[in-house]
């Protein structure tokens, strides 16, 4: 794929870059470049609504649902300029990048009218109910159950690693709606309100001091019968399509954040003299090469017009970037030295690079562990024989 930028695209870049830079230097300068996702939640919500007010929240969506009908090239440009401006990680990333596109693809007209305005407007924050204590990378092992009771689905089970659930208004839940079903069969995809007696959220404190992840317990939690995307039993199909959206244009914005992190490592090495170390210089060069290769691979992946299917490039991308960032975190710690191991106060808060190092350990776990990703690459990408499974 050759992704060229036309004069119109460059004009679009100037427009969005100018707006983003002005916001990050002006009314939202206080949240520019903040490293922790759980910091300044009220301000981050205000930022979501500011993006929406100027139609920058979900530019790839149709105009009728608050977007700009932006082309692929324009979406790439915006993702890059967003990260370049130091704008904070989107607190509603799951709503804008995952729930919204999935509702657009599978939702009825009534469902689109019910859910999309809140996402596009920045007033409805979403979280993801996929992983469970025994169904993380092996999503098909979901045990959460949903049964019909009159005009409602009643859901019982436990989800885990539910990012930002304690700040979210809505959750999409993969649940087993067919008794006796196993594996990917018999699953359904439900859209549920978080603010109800049947849902309890318990934050999980991480080693970097944050509590972004949560356990989410569903005890006779309810949603309307028409709050299901697709038909009963089609949850696996919807869930896999959502994962394809997860590997979409936002990957280019993610890489610009990686660019910022690598530049910060280089600046630290220059400041403390480590840049003269030939081993450090070689590792920086390898990081630079890896980042450029990721960009080229992501552009090739995005050239696939069928984003409802996960192709070989998407299968390899997760393990590629997770491993690269883990290595970058280790490089950052070696550059900074012992100072990176110290944090002041009982309620400790790490600097940006030590925080990146600590958080990068989870990159190789969430969204599919590196080990599971290797199996997926072998079986689905290369067509190799399946790994032997025990009897069900």
Image (spheres, grey):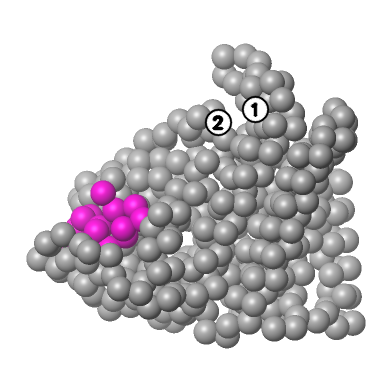
Instruction: Examine the structure image and report whether residue 387 is included in the region drawn in magenta.
Output: no
The vertical placement of 108 against 23, above or below, is: below
Q: Residue at x 24, y 75 (%)?
A: 232
In the rendering, at what x and y percent does residue 64 appear?
Answer: 61, 80
Distance from disc 2 to disc 1, alpha carbons, whole Å, reads: 7 Å
Is 335 left or right of 26, judged from the image as shown?
A: left
In the rendering, at what x and y percent does residue 208 appear?
Answer: 55, 31
Q: What segment carries the magenta color?
A: 134-152
Is 106 left or right of 145, judged from the image as shown?
A: right
Q: Residue at x 32, y 67 (%)?
A: 189
Q: Residue at x 79, y 61 (%)?
A: 81
In the rendering, at what x and y percent does residue 83 appear?
Answer: 74, 55
Instruction: Examine the structure image and report whether residue 144 is included in the region drawn in magenta.
Output: yes
Q: Quadrant of residue 27?
A: top right
Q: Which mark is residue 178?
A: none
108, 216: nearer the viewer: 216
The residue tagged 1 is 350
Q: Residues within 10 Å of mark 2 (few under 14, many from 20)?
A: some
Whether residues under marks 2 and 1 lie with C-beta atoms below 8 angstroms apart, the answer is yes
Quadrant (top left/top right/bottom left/bottom right) for the N terminus: bottom right
Q: Which mark is residue 208?
A: 2
- Report if residue 41 is visible in the image: no
Mark closer to the chain start, 2 or 1: 2
């Amino acid at each position: 794929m050759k992704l060229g930028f036309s004069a119109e695209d460059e004009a679009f870049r100037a427009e969005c870059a100018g707006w983003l830079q002005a916001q990050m230097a002006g009314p939202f300068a206080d949240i520019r470049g903040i490293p922790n996702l759980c910091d300044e939640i009220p301000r981050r919500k205000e930022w979501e609504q500011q993006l929406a007010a100027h139609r920058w929240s979900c530019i790839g969506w149709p105009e009728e649902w608050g977007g700009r009908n932006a082309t692929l090239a324009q979406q790439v440009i915006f993702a890059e300029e967003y990260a370049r401006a130091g704008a904070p990680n989107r607190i509603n990333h799951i709503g804008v990048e995952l729930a919204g596109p999935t509702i657009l693809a599978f939702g009825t007209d009534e469902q689109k009218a019910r859910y999309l305005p809140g996402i596009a407007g920045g007033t409805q924050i979403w979280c993801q109910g996929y992983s469970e204590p025994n169904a993380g990378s092996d999503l098909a092992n979901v045990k959460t159950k949903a049964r019909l009771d009159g005009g409602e689905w009643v859901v019982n089970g436990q989800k885990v690693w539910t990012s930002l659930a304690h700040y979210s208004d809505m959750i999409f839940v993969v649940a087993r709606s067919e008794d006796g079903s196993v594996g990917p069969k018999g699953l359904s995809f439900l859209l549920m309100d978080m603010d109800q007696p049947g849902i309890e959220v318990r934050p999980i404190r991480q080693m970097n001091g944050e509590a972004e992840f949560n356990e989410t317990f569903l005890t006779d939690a309810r949603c309307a019968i028409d709050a299901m995307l697709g038909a009963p039993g089609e949850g696996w199909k919807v869930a896999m399509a959502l994962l394809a959206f997860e590997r979409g244009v936002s990957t280019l914005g993610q890489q610009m954040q990686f660019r910022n992190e690598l530049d910060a490592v280089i600046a630290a090495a220059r400041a403390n003299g480590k840049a003269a170390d030939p081993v450090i210089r070689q590792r920086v060069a390898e990081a630079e090469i890896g980042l450029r290769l990721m960009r080229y691979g992501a552009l090739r992946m995005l050239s696939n017009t069928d984003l409802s299917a996960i192709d070989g490039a998407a299968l390899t991308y997760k393990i590629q970037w997770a491993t690269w960032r883990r290595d970058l975190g280790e490089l950052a710690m070696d550059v900074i030295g012992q100072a990176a191991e110290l944090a002041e106060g009982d309620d400790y808060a790490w600097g940006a690079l030590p925080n990146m190092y600590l958080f990068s350990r989870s990159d190789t776990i969430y969204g599919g562990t590196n080990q599971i990703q290797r199996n997926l690459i072998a079986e689905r990408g290369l067509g190799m024989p399946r790994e032997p499974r025990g009897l069900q």
